[in-house]
Image (cartoon, rainbow, N blue to C red):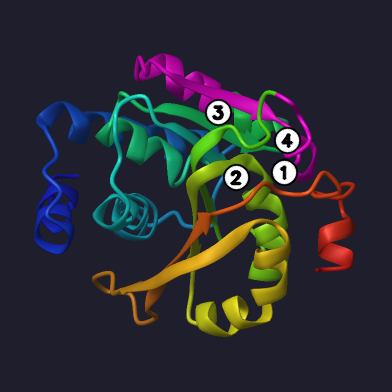
Amino acid sequence: MQALAQEAARLFDIRLSARQVGQMQRHADELALWNRQVNLTAITDPQEVLVRHFLDSLSVAAFVPLRAGMQVMDVGTGAGFPGLPLHVLCPGTRLNLLDATAKKLRFLDHLIGLLELEGARTLHARAEQAGQMPAEREAHDLVLARTVARMPVLAEYMLPLARVGGQCVAMKGGSARQEVKAATRAIGLLGGRLNRIETLQLPGVAQSHHLVILDKVAPTPAAWPRQPGTPARRPL
């Protein structure tokens, strides 16, 4: 994990303390341990875990400032990426880890306790359900998602959860610009506006990674998000 600290500093000017490096190492160790019994990630090589999970997650902080008190929602968090590394980096955030798979949330609840993370919690629901919950709808300063769905669908998952004035960050691969073009109508209908697309290159990874950053500029109409499964079947 010391290599993670070096690469985070070199690529993103992010400085990790010894405690933060230790917490991320424990996350990686527990992920490897649990993954033998529970399918949490297909990435198991330690170097790939370091780059494709932890360094990739930290890249968000290079382009979107984190601050204490910020309400953050990680949609489809899986094994806790990108939300948990970002929370370790900025422990004053209020992190919500959203996933529809209970076994993944059991792992995350275990990890939150093990790492003694204050201000982090799990939420067992689909994104479409969370977007209609009064406590979650338009309540978050920053909504994150990584490889959850294509942008026309992902916009309907993310934007209802963001407050007006907040942002959504979708972490995408090489198809990012084409996906954003296809999602132009959906983004506008849901109260969003494209801010920019940032491109980054992770060490040892051939494909470029992209951060699609959306601004929430207007309230999302009450009709959205639709019932679970509908956005994927009939994208806006």
Disc 4, SS: helix
Could you tell which of marks 4 and 3 lies nearer the N-terminus? 3
Q: Are marks 2 and 4 in contact (CB under 8 Å)?
A: yes
**Disc number at residue 107?**
3
**Disc number at residue 130?**
4
Task: Evaluate whether residue 213 shows in this view.
Answer: yes
- Up the image or down, 169 lies above or below 181; here it is above
Disc 2 to disc 4, how far (Cα)? 10 Å
Q: Nearer the viewer, residue 199 or 156?
A: 156
Disc 1, SS: helix
Q: Label 2 is placed on what type of residue?
A: Val
**Left or right of 3 on screen, residue 82:** right
Write down the region rendered in magenta: 108-134
Q: Pointer 1: what residue? A: 127
**Left or right of 222 on screen, residue 154:** left
Disc 3 to disc 1, how far (Cα)? 19 Å
Can residue 114 be found in the magenta stretch?
yes
**Callout 1 crowding tier (Cα within 10 Å): few <14, some 14–19, many ≥20:** many
